[in-house]
Amino acid sequence: MENEKIPSVYEHGSCSRSAEPEPRPNDSRILGRKYHLYWALGFGSSAIVKLASDVTTGHGVAIKIFDKEFIDGKKKSVKKRMKIALEREISAMTMLRSHPNVVRIIEVMATTTRVYIVMELVVGGATLLDKIGRTSGMSETQARQYFHQLICAVDYCHSRGVIHRDLNPSNLLLAADGVLKVSDFGMTALPQQARQDGLLHSACGALDYKAPEVIRNRGYEGEKADIWSCGAILFHLVAGDVPFTNILQADFICPSFFSASLVALIRRILDPNPTTRITMNEIFENEWFMENYEPPRFYRQNFTFALDMINDSNLDVNVPNLVHRIHKSVLLRGMEQGLQHHQETSFISQNPVDEIIDGIERVAGIMGFDVKRINSFRMSIEGGANARRKGHLAIFIKISEIAQPFHMVELRKAEGDVLEFHNFCKHIYAALSDFIWKGRAEPIDTETDG
């Protein structure tokens, strides 16, 4: 059964006003003391997207507003589907929030009557469909730039277990600087949706970009269906029109101005047999795709090291208790961050600083990272063997002396894919296991440790 469509971040043509926020108190209302709400950017069957600005900073945002009463007024089966779709959309956007080619969720707010998804405002506001319409097709060079960004975003989605299922040019936003942003995760599928056969069964998506196995409605692999949609979009970018008159037969003809390497790639993507259809791994090895490819640069994050958060005046002068207290403080801070962050890790070592740094440099070098020593106690690590596909990873490391002979080693992701950061940390912990202080076995001194 089809999921009910919920609107993309912008549905152009529905609103003639500028997408630039103009904070005017008489033309707005305040949401949760945090955002000025302005005019509508787009409408859908179950939500409205409005322009807003942050009360404190004045920065523009887009807010997607769902009316709970409207949803509750639907018949039971429809209401259930709409609520599940909303939950999946929020879950998916939260998992994908750090990727530069995905519309970034900022926060979710709710009242008794409405749910608000606060998202980044894509300044420029056109969709890829608008771009195609103005050009009637574009050069392979320009199309490749957009396709690079689309594939990087979709590959990132799949690495998180997120299947988009509605990839089409109207759901791909273009910022003023040419950055492509995937939006509209209302039809998203997550791993738990697959049936016992391991396949998805809801026939989602725009018809011109929908894979034949989705149309047949006999079950399909979500990743392969998304890849098909990407291929249909690529064809549309260069040809200026959709590829098919008969999708089930994959009946299409590439225009004569397509290069031979582009034709070869499109035929691999638009293969009606999902078993032999090209995979993401193969796309990243394809000659046409890799020309002038630049990996994505993730949002660089501001951060503080965990040890900087500890009040030195409250530390116990008893060395074992001191080390235990700091160790416990760092662990608690990590627990408070919850599952959605995992941006840092730390360990305590009794080894000298030079040995710790040499060990980290050795592991980083094996993994293809560039290492820079900032000073005797700080270093940065950037790049990585997977950077070409997974994007640039930047890690800052600080080594702090707690009390002789103990050192706290903190690793903090500043930029990049959190799973790649986890992989790096796993290698560090395995290679430096002899360096890591495992903690004391004796009971804590309750008088000095509180």
Image: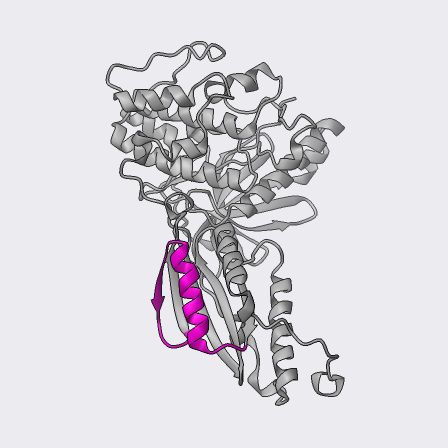
Q: How far across and down, in percent of the image, does residue 30 sit?
A: 55, 54
Reply above or below: 170 against 258: below
Image height of 144 relative to 250, above or below? below
Residue 128 point in image, percent of width and height: 37, 31
**Residue 130 showing in the rendered view:** yes
**370 w.r.t. 135: above or below:** below
Residue found at the far bottom of this picture: 317
The percent position of residue 62, horizontal first and vertical second, equals 48, 45
Residue 68 location, quadrant: top right
Residue 14 visible in rendering: no
* Residue 47 image offset from top left, x and y in percent: 58, 36
The residue furthest front is 434
Of the pair 72 and 431, the residue shown nearer to us: 431
Q: Indicate the quadrant containing the C terminus: top left, top right, bottom left or bottom right.
A: bottom right
Name the residue: 40% across, 22% down: 268
Segment tinted magenta in the rendering: 350-377
**In percent of the image, x 45 and y 77: which residue is there?**
353
Q: Is residue 38 left or right of residue 297?
A: right
Residue placed most toward the observer, 392 or 252: 392
Report which quarter residue 397 is drawn in.
bottom left
In front: 350, or 343?
350
Seen at 51% across and 45% down, the residue is: 96
Quadrant containing the N terminus in the rendered view? top right
